[in-house]
Image (spheres, helix red, strand yellow):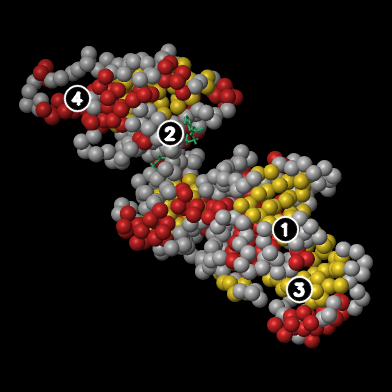
Amino acid sequence: MAASSSSSSSIKPIFTTRSKSSNSSKSSLLSFLHNTNPKPISLKFSSHNSNYTTPPSFTIRNSLQTALETSELPVSKFQDDLNLQAVTPKPTILVSEKLGEAGLAILRSFGNVECLYDLSPEALCEKISQCDALIVRSGTKVTRSVFEAANGKLKVVGRAGVGIDNVDLQAATEFGCLVVNAPIANTVAAAEHGIALLASMARNVSQADASIKADLVKCMPRTATDRKWLRSKYVGVSLVGKTLAVMGFGKVGSEVARRAKGLGMNVIAHDPYAPADKARAVGVELVSFDQALATADFISLHMPLNPTTSKIFNDETFAKMKKGVRIVNVARGGVIDEEALVRALDSGVVAQAALDVFTEEPPAKDSKLVQHENVTVTPHLGASTKEAQEGVAIEIAEAVVGALRGELSATAINAPMVPSEVLSELAPYVVLAKKLGRLAVQLVSGGSGIKSVKLIYRSARDPDDLDTRILRAMITKGIIEPISASFINLVNADFTAKQKGLRISEERVVADSSPEFPIDSIQVQLSNVDSKFAAAVSENGEISIEGKVKFGIPHLTRVGSFGVDASLEGNLILCRQVDQPGMIGKVGNILGEHNVNVNFMSVGRTFRRNHGIMAIGVDEEPNQDSLKEIGKVPAIEEFVFLKL
Ligand SMILES: NC(=O)C1=CN([C@@H]2O[C@H](COP(=O)(O)OP(=O)(O)OC[C@H]3O[C@@H](n4cnc5c(N)ncnc54)[C@H](O)[C@@H]3O)[C@@H](O)[C@H]2O)C=CC1
Ligand SMILES: O=C(O)C(=O)COP(=O)(O)O
């Protein structure tokens, strides 16, 4: 057995989507859960040390409880355990901007839908504390104040479109609120609008149209021969044979590229993250940023707005462009320094611009950019086709309903996207992970602050084939929730751990077991803490416990240096005793006398007649008297009662 490892020294960012995500996995994700009208019940936990109640928003379905008590843990039954969201019988969904009817119908079949357009920021904050979900387009700013005002009620924000720059993702994550978007359905609409702007800009369509109409009004009483018919003023430029630089070769950018090739343009693209073979397949050469600027006759912008791309087109970068370049922007206004663009237009460096998006929408009435005669503008119409709006509405409605059911969304922005097949396979390990976390924290003696947690996964799988993000989140949940009021879910697990100064590292150890099972064992180690059960401390001085899944049931298989085999169900008593005959009977009798049913016992020992530990599974919580009596048995050196 080789002990190789790939280790991440600290918490990894969770803002990732997996390339394995696919529509098929999405549709199966959406289809596998149909727990209609689940009746929520509250779970209460208490330990001998402290009483803790789950935060008010945490509810769990009856069906899950049953599932957790059975050996079979189908994915649909353990969704709540992932705790993406609490489920309420009939969630309230606020739609703050116009959404297609087909999407509204899906939402109405699931919850109470309120369509309140044009809410002021204050009115939105006032309303939001009554809403489980909020659906927006680009016009609603979902700020930190909105999440604060939600007071924990808001579970999901659905962005009916692609760009999520109007949602404060950091705040959403901190508040454990899932953000999902609809990244597919408006791609073609945006690409078509880009092409429409490209062609109309090159041929001065909007300027010529406006001049004729203005003249018609002005010249009403005059003769036809007096009227302006500015054929020479609006001579345009041809597209064929010209070089178009597509900046951002994602979904929209690649569709624009395809269409521009059809118009006979020479298309190049700049995108630091686009795979070269994807570009090659469309017949597009990927070039550097500067090369794109220096070569292009036309530049079309299709990157997201983020701190890296904000005002990426500025005085300095305009200066690198070919004189007389023409720019189209259907991405986001903020990627351009608009004042610099006015200067570039005035100096003739930029001959024309066609803009669908602006830093401020709608732009100020006195905007020099909008008033510029060489600028064509549209009011953020990229996604506004009937087809796209219906598609986006359905896409976002399905994502939001799925999230409210507790599913892992295929379009989650601030949570790991885990394909359904991976989820299904990891189901029992998710339960194991949470129980190990919960168990480990109960072994810490009061006052020791946990700072460092190490998770060791033994697996015969290649590290790339093992997605441990859910497991890490669930162990974190198990550790943090019992000792704080925090509600932990997949969205905020890493963030909350960081906030609490908890350093979580992961290690994978190659096991020589069968790769048929994703994981052989999970070990949780807490370092630099004192334990209330000294036997749980390994030779290395850490609290260390290990668990495995056996026949679908999570088992505790090691405590400190002692091997045990206890199924992690109900409650557990761990005793360290001098290894001698009769111990099982003595403890069993005490529990029996107090009407506590023992469902299993497992004994582990260092070596014969030395020290041993007993793991005793009990259905009921023993009262203080019975625990005291156990403590008085002379051979028992220490014991601890643990709630799983
Ligand atoms: N005007 C409108 O109504 C619409 C606007 N959009 C906007 O269009 C943009 C693109 O949307 P999609 O293609 O769907 O997104 P996408 O995520 O599929 O593509 C964006 C591409 O930009 C690339 N990128 C990131 N940083 C870059 C950088 N610094 N330089 C160059 N490329 C960079 C990414 O690698 C990615 O390939 C977004 O800003 C979106 O909000 C999308 C739909 C409608
Ligand atoms: O999807 C996007 O990124 C868009 O910009 C579309 O915005 P809208 O939904 O039309 O306000």
Q: CA distance from mark 1 to mark 2?
A: 45 Å
Q: CA distance from mark 3 to mark 4?
A: 89 Å
> Depth check: 325 or 203 in front?
325
Q: Disc 1 designates what residue? A: 542
Picture residue at 28% right of the left edge, 41% below the top: 362
Q: For ligand 1, tell me if the residue under mark 3 lies within 8 Å.
A: no
Q: Residue 190, labelled with which disc?
A: none
Of the numbered discs 2 and 3, the one sitting upstream in the chain is 2
Of the numbered discs 1 and 3, the one sitting upstream in the chain is 1
Q: Disc 3 designates what residue? A: 639
Query: Quarter-wise, where is residue 58 in the image?
Result: bottom right
Q: Disc 4 designates what residue? A: 211
Picture residue at 54% right of the left edge, 62% below the top: 487
- Asked if 252 appears above or below 574 in the picture, the reply is above
The residue type indicated by label 4 comes to Ser
Q: Are marks 1 and 4 in contact (CB under 8 Å)?
A: no
Q: CA distance from mark 1 to mark 3?
A: 18 Å
Of the numbered discs 1 and 4, the one sitting upstream in the chain is 4
Foreground label between 1 and 2: 1
Q: For ligand 1, tell me if the residue under mark 2 lies within 8 Å.
A: yes
Q: Secondary structure at mark 3?
A: strand
Foreground label between 2 and 3: 3
Q: Disc 2 designates what residue? A: 309
630 left or right of 105? right
Foreground label between 3 and 4: 3
Where residue 633 sits: x, y (%)? 82, 81
Foreground label between 1 and 4: 1
Give the crowd class for mark 2: few <14, some 14-19, many >=20 residues within 10 Å: some
Work out whether residue 420 can be spotted.
Answer: no
The residue type indicated by label 2 comes to Thr
> Depth check: 293 or 10 in front?
10
